[in-house]
Structure formats: structure tokens, C-alpha cells
Amino acid sequence: MTVRDYSHYISGAFEAWNGETVERRSPASGETVARYASGTPADIDRAVTAARKAFESGDWSELSGMERAEVLNRLADLIQENFERLVRIEVEETGKPIRFARGDINGAVGLTRYAASLGMQMAGTTYTNLGRDRTALIMREPVGVVGLVTPWNFPALILMQKVPFALAAGCTVVVKPSEFTSGSTLEIAALASKAGLPDGVFNVVSGKGTVVGQRLTDHPGVDFISFTGSTRVGRNVIESSAKNIVKTSMELGGKSANIVFADADLDAAVDGALMGVFFNNGECCVSGSRLFVQSTVADDFIARVARRASELKVGDPFDDKTDIGAMIDENHFGKVLDFVKSGVAEGAKLLTGGEAAKLGSGHYVQPTVFDHVTPSMTIFQEEIFGPVLSVTRFDTLGEVIGLANDSQYGLSNYVWSKNIDTVMTVSRRLKSGWVQANTIIDGAPQLPLTGVKGSGFGYEMGQAGFEEFTQLKTLFLHTGPRQPVFGS
Ligand code: NDP
């Protein structure tokens, strides 16, 4: 296997690097697949300076929306042309099944094209009703230099939930990808230069979160920080940003409820339960990891979910038939298994799985389903971020709303019912930024994602996600003669 060696991407080129590196081993095979520069605070400083210079030059920020869209659409073309390479990088570095990695790269293309179209519509408002000779223009401007921090579970997809939106608005960016999965980010930055993006507009610094991530989010030269990651680190980033009084957007953890009423299409809901928790190895912020099933159909429904879970194919992420690949690293793999042990110890009923899947040297966990989970249990409350489903039975709508909202998180929730009254009532009463009915982990670039409570704030994707990268400036304009205010 060829090992990919990367250095930072600053001012439109990969820099020479002979410092320390972060070695990435495939979580599926244990083989080294990439080495990235292990950056220092000075590397972030250089990248922020490059981004500032590029922003102030106006070479990007003052282009028309149409010109920016042309570059972004060329970038989308280049991502498509490099599809197989990017998919391979994602699979090697994350351990996710290849069919999901294909979906990620296709998603990245769609997000880029959609963001390009939004840049062409960037507009403010004009007030002409303020009285004679008085007009106000509320102008929408790019926010400036943006610091982006991304996680490891969807490296290219989450990157492109941010970067093209920032670029379409005219911003320049410095990205700090996860130290486990920096490859696709660095490759996409180089493709952006090839697409015609001016030097210094899209910079990437790799390395440890506690070093380069910390410096980026502390940096006084950054105008906006868009962070996706855990609630723990998000809290730290908010504290850092307070020093510089900088706007932040926080896309944090989740513990979503997936609620199945007895009147649902139960075949679809069984599929939805599996998709909800086993998609992307369960390493998914919007994972439907808490399944609530109405008691009248619960025994049969839960037995079907457990049986189907036990039949899922765990193993080589490059195999098209694989459903669940390898956990991101040994440490995380251990944490997932510890959660499973806590489920057993706290009295949940293990229906299937519950152990590591012994397949070579990879970090694989069997698809696991627990029944009779109660709100006091750790597996009900904590984000496990692995293929572990907790199931709780309920009788009434009011009861399940209380159970679903009993969480520190509020990212996403799901409801299955054929009754529109039930769907609407539940959707309105769930405390989360996102609710999906009769579908699960669905989405489109037009739809904003946001969280409430411990899941964060700020928007990603959609018009609202685009506007995060802009700010309003009000120009109050007086024309014609003015009456003196003082004297005559
Ligand atoms: P982490 O919070 O551990 O890391 C996220 C990013 O922050 C990484 O790039 C990490 O770098 C960096 N980082 C770590 N420490 C610091 C620091 N002190 N200052 C600044 N940056 C830092 O999350 P994971 O990568 O483990 O991702 C999983 C989490 O992300 C889950 O909680 C999941 O729910 C959440 N998530 C939320 C989404 C949403 O849209 N709401 C979407 C996807 C994931 P390094 O890798 O080098 O440590």
C-alpha cells in the first residue's frame, strides 16, 4: 500500500515539511496509510496571515457571486473527477464501509454546487420608506477569515458543509481537520487551487487538536469559528472564543430518539431503526441511538430489529457488502465496548452483539441491541458513537415525549407514524434542531442542520448556513439638503 505523505496547505501550495508527523494507520487493517505534518501554533499563525492577506486583497472577496460560483462549480467537477481516489482515502482513514464513503463524496459535490448557487443570490435589503431624502441599505458582507474545525466521522462531507458556503460568501478559510482523517481535506484544498481559487483563500493545517486546533480557535486574527465535534471540546472552543469576542457556530454531539408508534409502516420502521444506529458504524452525530417502541407492537418489532442486526455483515470496509466497518481507533473502540459493559452492569437486556468482532487486527464491534433500557442508565444518556442501540418501550405520546426530551442533547429526532396529527404533535414537542418523520438520517443541501441544548447552536447548510458566513452592515444614506439640528 502506498503511504500518502502530506504537509500543510498554505497560500495555494503544500509547504516543505521536515518536522514531526502524525501517522495514520487504517483502523481496519492496522497498516499505515498516511502521514500528516503535526503542526505547531506558528503554522496556524502563518495560515491565518495568508488567509487575512487573501481576504483583504479582494481577489476573492470582491469577485462577483457569479465568478465565485464558476470556481466552486469547477471544484465540484474536480471532486467528481477524483471520486475514486477520494472515496479510497475516506475508507482507508475512517474504516467506514465503502458504500457510505461513496455517498459522502457525492454529497460533497452536491453541497458545493448548491453553495455556489447561493453565492449568486447574496443580497441585503433596502429601506425606501424612512422619509424624504432618507434611504437605508442593509448590505450583506462576508464575515472575513473563518477558522473551521472538523471531526473524523465524515471528513469530506462535513468539510463541504462548511467550506463552499464560506467561499461562496467571499470568506477565506483556515481548516484544522481531525488528526485521524486529514487526507481528503488536504486533497480538496489542492483541487480548489486547480479550480482557480486564489492562493491563501483555502488553507489547511494538520496536527493535534490540543495544539493547532487550540491555536486556531484562540487566534485573534480569526473573525468566525465554525466547529463540529464533541460537546466537551465545543465548550472549550466557546471559552477560547470569548477572549477575542468572536462569533462561533457549534455543531456538537447528539443522542437522538427514534420513536415508533404502533400505527407506523412497521417494515419501514424496522429498516429505519437499523439505518438509524448502524449507518456509518454508528459513528454519526444524528444517529437514532435511542429507539422507543410503542408497547402494543414492541415484542415483535424489537425481535425483528435484533434478528436483522445480528445478520449485518461486519468487516472489510472495502467490501461492497459490508454494513459495519472498523471503529476509528483503538481508544474509541475501547470506549464503545466499555459502554456496552455498562449496559449489562446496569441491568439492560442484551439481545444481540455485545462484544468485539474478532476480525484480524481491526477494531470491529458487533452490532449490539439492548432492550429494557431506562433513563437512569449510562447507555440511555451518553453518546456512544458506535453500533449500539438502546431500546425503551412506551405506552402514550406524552410519555414518549418526556423520555425523548430527557437528554442533555438536542440535535435530531425521528418519528414513525401514519397519523399526521401524531407526527405534527410529536415534531413540535421534541426539543431538537431537526426532526424527521417516516425517514431517518435523510437530508439535502437546502436543509439547515442545527442543534439545541448540548448539541450546540448556529446553522450548517441551507440559506441559514450560508448566512452564518456573512454579516450585515447598515448604510444610512441622506441625500439632498439637511435641516440643521443645532442653531438655525
Ligand atoms: P472532537 O471534539 O474530539 O474533535 C473535533 C475536532 O476538534 C477535531 O479536529 C479535533 O482535533 C479538534 N480539537 C480537539 N481538541 C481541540 C481543542 N482543544 N481546540 C480546538 N480543537 C480541538 O470530536 P471527534 O472528532 O471525536 O468527533 C466526534 C464528535 O463530533 C461527536 O460528539 C459527534 O456527535 C460530533 N459531531 C457533530 C456533528 C454535528 O453536525 N452536530 C457532526 C459530526 C460529528 P483532533 O482530531 O486532532 O483531536
Image (cartoon, rainbow, N blue to C red):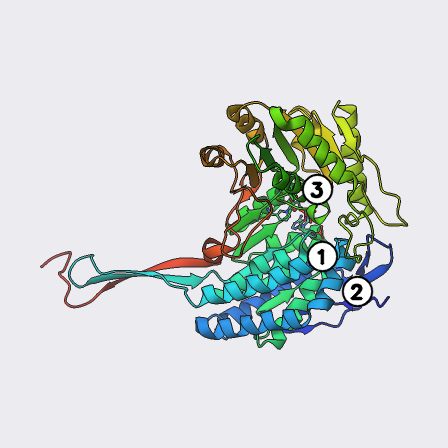
Vertical side of 273 occupied by 194: above or below: below
Vertical side of 401 occupied by 52: above or below: below
Q: Indicate the secondary structure of the residue bearing disc 2.
A: loop
Residue toward you, 304 or 445: 304
Q: Disc 2 and disc 3: Cα gap in Å?
A: 33 Å
Q: Say which residue label 3 marks.
A: 385
Mark 3, other Cα within 10 Å: few <14 / some 14–19 / many ≥20: many
Q: Which tag, 2 or 3, sits closer to the chain's start? A: 2
- What numbered label is drawn on residue 75? none
Q: Locate residue 446, reporting x and y percent.
A: 49, 56
Whether the residue under disc 3 has CB within 8 Å of ligand 1: yes
Does residue 451 appear in the picture of this structure? yes
Left/right placement of residue 221 relative to residue 483 reads right
- What numbered label is drawn on residue 99? 1
**Residue pushed farthest right?**
360
Q: Locate residue 329, reporting x and y percent.
A: 80, 48
Left/right placement of residue 161 relative to residue 488 reads right
Q: Say which residue label 2 marks.
A: 19
Quarter of the image with the N terminus in it: bottom right
Q: Amino acid at mark 2?
A: Gly
Q: Disc 3 and disc 1: Cα gap in Å?
A: 19 Å
- Could you say which quadrant of the image residue 302 lies in? top right
Quarter of the image with the C terminus in it: bottom left
